[in-house]
Every structure is written in structure tokens, then in C-alpha cells.
Amino acid sequence: MNRFRVTLRLCVISGLMLMAPALQWAQTAAVTPDDSSHSKLDDIIKETQKSVGRKGITGLVWWIPPEFWEESATQNGTSLQKAQQTFAPMRQYTMVIAAVGKLGLGNINWYSENELRSNTTLTDFEGTSYKPLTEISPDAKGIASIVKPVLTNILGPMGQSLQIMFFPAKTAKGFLIADPVREGSFSISIADTT
């Protein structure tokens, strides 16, 4: 069975920078070359979103830290304290969104939810592997139920094929698997479904 691995290297970044993926998708004004935030946003996108590409396979893997949700809320006028309180339940998880498919003749045959979930593994910095959780909190389910339609609307067929997966937030020793304010790495492996 062929597998491909996407390694997400975590760099030390500020909470504001975690908004990068949403800002990139939601931007309506053009960014000028002199805009210094443009390169910062690009750097953060490189850290949280990775393209999947190899012969006959394409897709996207996006790690979304809890700070992303908090920053999104504060950018929309919510106080930081209220945003942290609202999104505190997301700190129980490492949230990953993925869409992977096989290139066909003029189309992409996206993996189904079952195919993607059963073939995806997160490996932490210690080498411990985790499968997507099957039971998550009602709050996490609520976030997923809001995110998926928005991404479907923005990305079309790829958005319809995005799968939201939740993994544990911490290792057995209590260390964060993915910490947006510390350097480190973790990887997502997706086995080929053929």
C-alpha cells in the first residue's frame, strides 16, 4: 500500500498570523507588493496548509490551531476573553482538514469521507501515531458543521470533498502535539486507497 506524508513544521508565530488562511480566502482587496503583511501571510500559510501532490494524486491538508478560531472571532469584533472562552473546547483537539483525490481524465476523483478517515494517520514528534477520533464533543461538532458549508461554498467540488478530522491535542505524556507558539513538527500520512 502506497502512503504519502505531509509534514507540518510548526514555527513560532503570533496569534494574528494564524488568521492567514482565512484572510487569504476572504480577501477582496488586492495586496500590493509593498505590503509587508503579504509575505508574513504567505509564510504562515506555508506552515498551516500543505498541498498534496504526487503522480496521480492531488489535494490539501490544513492544520487549524485553536488560536485561529480565537483570532477569527476577535477580527470580527469579539473580545479576546470571550473568544478564548467560546473556543476553549477546541483545545482538546488537533484539528486537520484534508481533501485528497486521484487525478482522472479532466476531473479529480476525491476520496470519500470513509476512505480518507480510515487511511489517515497523524504522527507526533515522538513518533506516536493517532487515527482520527470517532467521538468528539458537541462543541467540536458544531464548529465542523459551520466550517464545512463555508468551505464548500468557497472551494466548490474540492470544498465538498474536504473532511474535517479531529485528533487528540496532547500526547500520553501531556505535551501538545501541535503547538503554534513553539517550534516542532508532526505529520499527516494518507494511504493510497487503491
Image: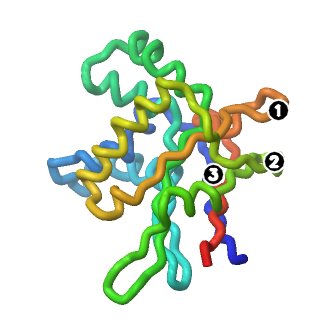
Earlier sequence position, callout 2 versus callout 1: 2
Verify CB contact (< 8 Å) between mark 2 and mark 1: yes
Verify CB contact (< 8 Å) between mark 3 and mark 2: no
Residue 151 at x, y = what percent?
A: 32, 49
Tag of residue 172: 1
Most extreme residue toward the bottom, as rendered?
Answer: 105
**Crowdedness of circle 3 by 10 Å Cα count: few (<14), some, many (20+)?**
some
Q: CA distance from mark 3 to mark 2?
A: 16 Å
Q: Report if residue 31 is visible in the image.
A: yes
Q: Quadrant of residue 149?
A: top left
Q: Quadrant of residue 155?
A: bottom left
Residue 24 at x, y = what percent?
A: 30, 50
Residue 28 at x, y = what percent?
A: 16, 48
Label 2: which residue?
128
Tag of residue 9: 3
Quadrant assignment for the N terminus = bottom right
Closer to the camera: disc 1 or disc 3?
1
- Along the line of sight, the residue nearer the viewer: 181 or 160: 160
- Along the line of sight, the residue nearer the viewer: 81 or 85: 85
Residue type at tag 3: Arg
Residue type at tag 1: Ala
**Who's the residue at 62% across and 45% down the image?**
10
Judge from the rendering whether residue 41 lies leftward or rightward of residue 169; answer left or right: left
Earlier sequence position, callout 1 versus callout 3: 3
Does residue 116 lie above or below 17 as drawn? below
Does residue 164 lie above or below 116 as drawn? above
